[in-house]
Image: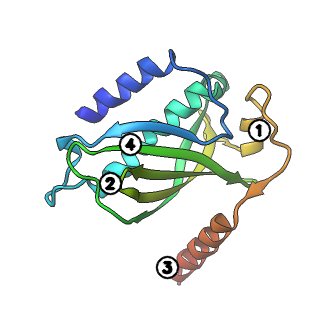
Amino acid sequence: MNLYFRFFTMMLTSWFKSATDIFSPFTTSHIVWPTDLDLLGHINNGRYFTITDNVRVEMMIRAGMWQAIRKQKFYPVIAGEMAQFRKPLLPFQRYQITTRFTGWDDKFLYVEHTFKSKRGVHALLMVKIRIISDSEKRISPKEMLDLIPNANVDAINVCHIVNKWNESSLDHWQQQSR
């Protein structure tokens, strides 16, 4: 239930916060609530992904992207996620999430989330996002990014980490198809 509270709070407050550039690192502050914990007393691994969903929506609202894609009846869906965990986030611990685009190709947008506190980096998450329309038509990232005022999206830009992830995912899917 607290995730709905976080989501609605974020939706209400993000409209009143300063605008951001979608291509600049975007940092938000958080606290670990008891409802975020698993049986071992640290933040549940699935909760990381749920919290980053909210962060991406806030980033898109504050960058003007949310309004543009909803006007076109586009919406983002997760096509893949990857996480690495280093240190646990503990009850009532304060932390920040820095979110940034790591690139896009002809099908997907790639977003990285870094969870940090005074104790250092806790987790790194990478998300692959596909944009589709209400009619389930697939929208290219460039087509979607072109909706953002003053955005320079001419170049296709993917970092080497994304390339390795995609190669690994393709190998894994091919192995499962046998």
* Residue in front for this viewpoint, 27 or 5: 27
Distance between mark 2 and mark 3 Cα atoms? 24 Å
* Amino acid at pointer 1: Glu
Q: Residues within 10 Å of mark 2 (few under 14, many from 20)?
A: few
Q: Residue under label 3, please give it.
A: 176
Which residue is rendered at x = 62% and y = 35% of the image?
135
* Amino acid at pointer 4: Ile
Residue 30: give x, y in percent of width and height: 35, 38
Q: Residues within 10 Å of mark 3 (few under 14, many from 20)?
A: few
Residue 1: give x, y in percent of width and height: 22, 33
Residue 124: give x, y in percent of width and height: 47, 59
Tag 3 or tag 4, which sits nearer the N-term?
4
Q: Residues within 10 Å of mark 4 (few under 14, many from 20)?
A: some
- Which of the 4 image quarters holds residue 138? top right
Which residue is rendered at x = 43% and y = 51% of the image?
115
Which residue is rendered at x = 46% and y = 36% of the image?
28
Q: Is residue 123 above or below residue 37?
A: below
* Residue in front for this viewpoint, 121 or 143: 121
Distance between mark 2 and mark 4 Cα atoms? 9 Å
Q: Secondary structure at mark 2?
A: helix
Q: Count numbered badges in the picture.
A: 4
Distance between mark 2 and mark 1 Cα atoms? 31 Å
Residue 126: give x, y in percent of width and height: 53, 57
Q: Which mark is residue 143?
A: 1
Q: Which mark is residue 46?
A: 2
Distance between mark 1 and mark 4 Cα atoms? 27 Å
* Amino acid at pointer 3: Gln
- Which of the 4 image quarters holds residue 72? top right
Which residue is rendered at x = 24% and y = 45% of the image?
36
Q: Residue under label 4, please give it.
A: 51
